Amino acid sequence: MPTLDIFNSDAFSVSSLTASINHVTEGQAVPSVVDALFLQGERGISTTTAWVERKGDSLQLVPAAPRGADADPVNKSTRDGQTFTAIHLPTRGGINADQVQNVRAFGSETEEEVVERMVQDELDRMRRNLSATITYHRMGAIKGLVLDATGSTLLDIHDAFNVSQQSQSMELDQAGTDIRALIIKAKRLSEKAVAGSMVNGFVALCGEGFFDLLTNHGDTKEAFNRYMDGEMLRNDPRSGFSFGGVVWRELYGKVGNTEFIDDEHAYLIPLGVPDLFITRWAPADYMETVNTLGIPYYAKQELRRMGKGVDLEAQSNPINLCTRPRAVIKLTHT
C-alpha cells in the first residue's frame, strides 16, 4: 500500500510533472483551426513581458539584448511600441490521501506507476481547461480583443497601438447582393494592410448566424450549383467550403458563457503572412523556472496540511497577438 511519501519521488518533481503535462498524446496532436494559425509563431521567452514595436500597421517583436549593447538598426524607423504582459492562467486540482492509500498494485504495474497514472489523469483534465482558454484568447487576438471568461477585457490590441479595426458589410440580408464583389473588396482591404507580404489564400471564421445566411443566400447557392454540381446543397458545409477565393468555416467554441465568435459576424484572415499571429510563452512563477525560457504548460505539486492529500497546480503564461490587426477584416451580415 503506497503512502503520500510516494510524492517525494523524482517522478513528481516540477520538471517531471511539467514534462508530463506538455506531453502531447495522439488524440491531442491535431490543433484546432484557430491554434493552427499560431503554430509557426510560437516561441518561449525568459521574461513575463514582450516589447512590441509598430512600423506602419505592423507590430514587430524586439529581441532582448544585454544592457549597453547596440540597438538593432532595423528598428530605428519605428514610430512607437507597447509592452505586453503575459496573461497568467493558473488552475488547481488534487488527489486525496484516501485515493493514494487505497491503491493496490496489480499485474506488472508498480504502486508508483498506478499513482503516476492518477496524477496524469488530473494533469490532462487541467491541461484541457488551459488549452480551451488559450484557444479562446487566440480567437480574441484574431478579433483584436482578448477577453477573460467573465467577459472583461484583458487586451485591446487595436487600442494599444491606436489603430482602428477594418470591417466590411456583406449585405447578406439583401437578396440581390453580389457577394463575390464584396468578398473581393474585403480581400483588398486585407491585402493593403499587409503590403509587402505575399498572401497565399484567405480563410473566414464565421459565427453560426452569419454562416447560415451565407450558405442560404441565393448568390452563393447558384454559384455552387454550377461549380460543384450542387455538393454544398446536399452536404453539411460547416467544415469549410471555398467561395470567392476564401475558405468559409463555421467556428463554434465557448469558454464559460462566452462564445468564440458572436452570431452575426465573421473574420476574414489572410494566410501565408509571416508572424501575423504569434504566441510567446513566459516562464511560470516558480523558483525552479525563474529566468528560463517559457514553455506552454507547467505543473507542480505540494502536500496538503496534515497530510490529507496533494494539491496539484497547472499553469500557462501566454502572450497571444495579431501583429497586423488591420489585416483581419471583420465581416458583418447587414
Image (spheres, rainbow, N blue to C red):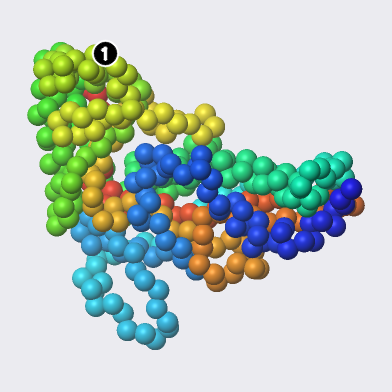
From the top left corner, tell me how far across and down residue 242 is, in percent: 21, 30
Label 1 residue SS: helix
Quickly name the residue at label 1: 234
User: Which of these two is toward me, 83 or 5?
Assistant: 5
Q: Residue at x 32, y 19 (%)?
A: 236
Q: Is residue 162 visible?
A: no
Q: Residue at x 11, y 17 (%)?
A: 226
Q: Residue at x 63, y 51 (%)?
A: 314
Above-or-below relation of 225 to 161: above
From the top left corner, tell me how far across and down residue 5 is, in percent: 85, 57
From the top left corner, tell me how far across and down residue 55 is, in percent: 23, 62
From the top left corner, tell me how far across and down residue 146 is, in percent: 42, 44
User: Which of these two is toward me, 106 or 96?
Assistant: 106
Q: Quadrant of residue 73?
A: bottom left
Q: Quadrant of the C terminus?
A: top left
Extreme residue in the front direction: 108
Above-or-below relation of 292 to 185: below
User: Which of these two is toward me, 232 or 334?
Assistant: 232
Above-or-below relation of 304 to 256: below
Q: Which amino acid does the dot numbered 1 rest on? A: Arg
